[in-house]
Amino acid sequence: MSINNRNEIVPEGYMKDRKARLVPVEQVSDYDREMDDFVRARVAEAKAKSQAMADFKRQSFGDCYAWIELAAEKFGRKPGGLKGNVTFSSFDGSQQIKIAVQDKLTFGPEL
């Protein structure tokens, strides 16, 4: 048995088609099996890279906010604008990291 991407159990020797019907593997063309393997491999790789990017983003935000605290403590400077936006620039200005804080609007039931 195997589990597909929807956490459904698919019996060994079968594949689910687009209509969720179980089809014996020997009735699925070589082309369709190869296409299935290709797509699943690319999607798995994309999910792994997406998770790596999410981890990198989380770590980078933490590093940026830690640097802001260090700069405030060590140099008496606090980069950033009124709304919390901040830009970190290399000395020559050729590279930048920007954190833009979006305004949040909340609507209550009285609206």
Image: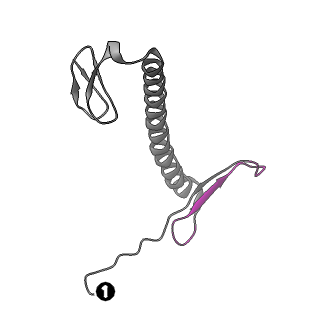
Say above or below: 13 vs 38: above
Residue closer to the observer: 14 or 41: 14
Residue closer to the observer: 53 or 28: 28
Residue labelled with disc 1: 111
Residue at point 76%, 48% (across, down): 94
Q: Examine the image and state in which quarter residue 14 appears.
A: top left
Q: Quadrant of the N terminus?
A: top left
Q: Residue at the far right: name it.
A: 92
Image side of residue 2 versus residue 69, left or right: left
Q: Examine the image and state in which quarter residue 12 appears.
A: top left
Say above or below: 107 vs 14: below
Residue closer to the observer: 58 or 72: 58
Q: Is residue 52 magenta?
A: no
Please tell me whether mark 1 sits on a helix, a strand or a loop: loop
Residue at point 43%, 28% (across, down): 44
Residue at point 49%, 39% (across, down): 53
Q: Which residues are magenta?
A: 81-94
- Relative image position of residue 30 (x, y in whole percent): 45, 14
Whether residue 77 appears in this view of the structure is no
- Relative image position of residue 15 (x, y in whole percent): 30, 22
Q: Residue at the far bottom: name it.
A: 110
